Amino acid sequence: MRRSAVLPLSMYAVAAALLFVPSANAQEWQTTGSLLGESKYGQNFQRYDYVRPDAPKGGTLNSAAFGTFDSFNPFIATGTAAAGLNYQGGLLWDTLMAKSTDEGSVSHPLIAEAYKHPADFSSATYRLNPNAIWHDGKPITVEDVIWSFNVMKKESPNYNQYFANVTEAVALSDHEVEFRFDQKGNRELPLIMGDLVVLPKHWWEGTDTNGKRRDVTRQTLEPPLGSGAYKIESFKPGSEIIWSRVPDYWAANLGVNIGRNNFDKQRFVYFQDDNAEWQAFTKGGIEDIRTENRSARWATGYDFPAFKSGAVVRKEFANTSGEPMQGFVLNTRRPQFQDRRVRKALTWAFDFESMNRTLFYSLYKRTDSYFEAQDLASTGLPQGEELEILEQYRDKLPPEWFTEEFKLPVYDTPQATRDNLRKAFELFKQAGWVNKGGKLVNEKSGEQFKIEFLGNDPTDERVTTPFIDNLRRLGIDASLRIVDTNQYIARLQTYDYDSVTVVLPQSSSPGNEQREFWGSKAADARGSRNYSGIKDPVVDTLVERVIFATNREDLLAATHALDRVLLWNYYLVPQWHNPTIWLAWWDKFGIPEKQPSYIGVDRDSWWIDPAKESALAAKYRSSN
């Protein structure tokens, strides 16, 4: 079958199965899984090579969190989960396998000690570690795994697209569970079944202290039963949560945990104001490690007494996992954003260069791919296999996509500013919007073009105002609305916005999660990450092409095509990224000499150094 042939959506699975060359490990038990060739550890993973195996345990890691929380259930589309919890389990729940911290698309044993799959990728079987137990001492069972899968696929907006091709989970024995798929050739799916968070069925189907039956589909502030390295010790609803390390954690001596999870306690204190959080960090005792995300602070703000005395140190860390796409999403569920020319016009009105120079101290770089800083990013003109893929949809794509490179506007001179805004105005005019009396209005209805940006922090004004000013120069009624965290999350989950800034991270081996980002079905699913509301048959088909890629080269071509189509559709206005990780911390930690380059920093490999903590106390006294 020719790969350049025009195929119905479902036929990509058939093509993938026919074209795939089986791996040597198909149907053999694997203790480490990889989508990018053999892991550097092979099948004998003992521990990460950067950790200190005998790192001391003890002390408290103090952290700050922003906003509030009202739930300990992170798997549903309502509520705000507490710090330490997320849809991947967080501190409380383990997954079948653990994603590697130092290699992309690699997983190591956790609840499952091994997995296997047939050569056609039609299913995956996981074998549970017989030592895996819940915090109440009961064993983690195949029944727990099956129940968790069913709950996640039905209730979680993150998992229902991720596991869309998984039809059922079936017990093969007391320690083996098989996941069956409705299509062959989905190379990623057997491995990512290991990302499944396993929940305790007996706890969630039991009753609380008041005798009321628990409900996994609803919010709760009853501390749930877990299996992970930490459990909830205490909390103040919305303002503080303290986690304590489980002393007899069943997986403490597994390779993924050796030399990690070294803090006896992790304490999160919530702030409603970014500046208050920053001031708390400079004083000490509230936030021990800070990932800095304000260029102005990194450039000029580290002049407070504790930093000058050496009590606080900072460092830049590189990472090799690529950069996320961050941008102003344009919600195509709203009528004014459904014309691609309008979305392109809005993109052309965004002046990154002036903002980088005047606000960001020229520290950021422009993001121009959904797969930034990876070989997955499209470049130049389409060619080779990518061109073959796009040729199938030539009649559905604008012709310039095949003859022009995708370029974002550059505002480097006054003339460029005038030219870019003039081009933006011309695009609006082509889409039926004209200037009347200084207002950009629809030539048919006379209604002024409006756009409201949604934010949840007063500092959003700093980075949105320059864009708003340019839009107002075009006659647009542009504004910013700041709401509290609960309102913000609720509006994000129900897509109640014109535009909002989002961050869309990508792995080094994209696959099933792309449905949730761009798929038509996800556009109507509450709480999905299809923030733009994309419903495009070409995008849907390219997503499937990515998922059912037959090898790495095929995946690169398919992802380049998807990236190019997303960019040319202008579903968001790309912002910027920081090419390094900015980290500052109070100098009380022991830190492995080497940190994992893939994620940049692994805080779980740090520990409290008693000598440094004592020295810090002395420095702290001298700085105050």
Image (tube, helix red, strand yellow):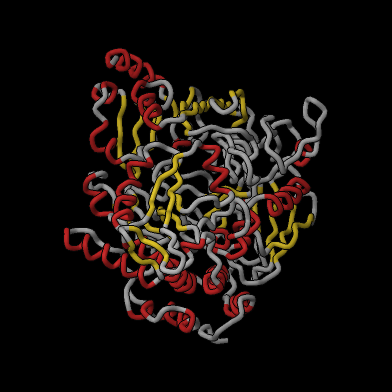
Q: Position of residue 519 (x, y in %)?
A: 57, 64
Horizontal side, residue 454 vs residue 308: left or right: right
The vertical placement of 330 against 588, above or below, is below
The answer to whether one can see residue 321 in this image is: no
Nearer to the camera, 258 or 179: 179
- Outermost residue toward the right? 211
- In percent of the image, x 52 and y 55: which residue is there? 531
Residue 52's image quarter? top left
Q: Is residue 98 above or below residue 239?
A: below
Left or right side of 297 for 140: right
Residue drawn at 48 percent across, 38 percent down = 483
Q: Residue 4: x, y in percent?
A: 51, 84
How far across and down, in percent of the image, does residue 622 sit? Answer: 27, 13
Q: Nearer the viewer, residue 451 or 416?
A: 451
Numbered-mark total? 0
Q: Residue at x 65, y 35 (%)?
A: 250
